[in-house]
Amino acid sequence: MHLKHNFSTLGESFYSATLIQPLLEQRLVECNQTLADNLAIDFKDSETLALLSGEQPITASLSMVYAGHQFGGFSPQLGDGRGVLLGEVVDQQGKLIDLHMKGAGPTPYSRRGDGRAVLRSCMREYLASEAMFALGVPTSRALALFDSREAVHRETPEMGAMLLRTANGHIRFGHFEYFFSRGMTDELDALIQYCLSHYYPECLETSSPIENMLLAVVERTAHMIAKWQAHGFQHGVMNTDNFSFTGETIDYGPFGFMEDYDESWVCNHSDYEGRYAFNRQPGVGLWNLNCLMRCFSSHLTRDQLVTILQTYETALQSHYDSLMLQKLGLSDVADLHKLWPSLVTILSQEKLDYSLFLRSLSLLSADDYSLLLDEVIDRERLRTWLDEYMSIRSLQGKDWQQVQQGMLTVNPKYVLRNYLAHEAIQAAEAGDYLPFRRLLNLITQPFDEHPACEALARRAPGWAKSLEVSCSS
Ligand code: AMP
Ligand code: MG
């Protein structure tokens, strides 16, 4: 393993030197072999494992300082309260990838927190980030999971754990807000140059690098959120300190994947006002980008910044439309816009399962709608919609089977349902990681058939409806 330490060259206003503080009797319980291979990391090598688990200190490891708008209010100083950036490695494609340990112990930014993470939340992040990757959503990834015998106190004592994760970058909108709000212009400029050379080098070749970099950030953010909406993902805590400058989904907390369709669903039970409700995510993305743009007010004019922000909505809509066209097997956006609103009414009024509906639609035959009609109360309403949908599809003149094959590659059969994660966590807490591995296998190949696991593709059983995700992590 060849660790680099590029971020640390920015200097100590950007971070505090921080080592991983290993947990009591920690064990490597899962590692992501494909990802590890791509990063030339060998967990079987004892020296590598000692470094990555914190048994052997990495002297240049650090915790980053940043700020952020949390639920609309500005917190002038946050930071990695329980995360340590170990450094960067180069992957097989020549790309620089951050290695970051979550739950690594207290840092100067821990405030009143213990610097730890519980097994439950590390497993949820592991599963979610790998599920998102398999769905093609830009995301941080899970490289390894360590459990331990150390008790970490949340509502009750839980098992402490650490998650080793990767991302293209861990620089957040909140990094810029930190330096801008303090008037630290030299540091802000250094951060901008760092991002240009490490994440947006193509912009350096242009006549207006900063402007083009911000356009690219807007585009990447729009792309990420369009994918969230199309796949029914809700982040839950879209604070600007959880928004990555490289446009990746990071900091999985009380997230959720849509099951019964509900546009105004709020997965985070601490989000009393529904600020981060599912249907508000696109708007919050813009709000967050607006916070980011303000930090560039001495680099670009107000008009330039507004023009950059104005590209967001069109970009998001076009990414969303293109994924929804694939999901519905359609080719014309006008057809999508005609069919989608009435389908949304049906999905929400009938409380249909979002993913299963689309999966079944991918398997529908023109002369038998029973697969879908049997799921609803108002059969006539759905039949009318399906008739219109089928007639539009037949007018496209495309090969029926080819369209369906295409739909099956974007509509997952297996979804990270909350109750499945819950069951896997309960088993792991009792020492059995088999359900976790089985679930991981399904959600990382979500479009495939797994005949032995049919039951895990179904809707949540009745008891699971009342499951609440704890926001403490
Ligand atoms: P989040 O919204 O979960 O990403 O966390 C918000 C902030 O709280 C971040 O700066 C975290 O590093 C910090 N934080 C969360 N949990 C803990 C913890 N157990 N100990 C210390 N800091 C924490
Ligand atoms: Mg965070």
Image (cartoon, helix red, strand yellow):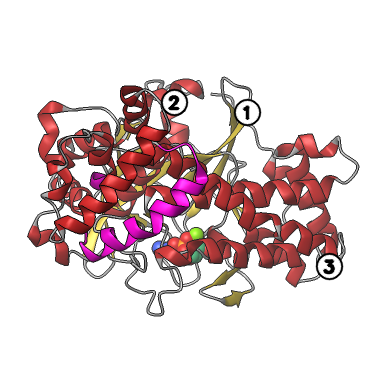
Foreground residue, 201 or 18? 201
Q: Nearer the viewer, mark 3 or mark 2?
A: 3
Q: Which quadrant of the rendered structure holds the C terminus?
A: bottom left
Q: Which residues are magenta?
A: 330-357
Residue 39 in the image: state x and y as whole percent: 51, 24
Label 2 CB less than 8 angstroms from ligand 2: no
**Main structural element of the magenta stretch: helix, strand or loop?**
helix
Quickly name the residue at label 2. 36
| Residue kind at label 2, given as amino acid type | Ala
Q: Residues within 10 Å of mark 3 (few under 14, many from 20)?
A: some
Disc 2 is placed on an element classified as: helix
Quickly name the residue at label 1. 95
Is residue 171 among what the camera can see?
no
344 in magenta:
yes
Disc 3 is placed on an element classified as: helix
**In whole angstroms, how far apart are the C-alphas of marks 3 and 2?**
44 Å
Quickly name the residue at label 3. 302
| Residue kind at label 3, given as amino acid type | Arg
**Going by the image, does 461 lie left or right of 469?**
left
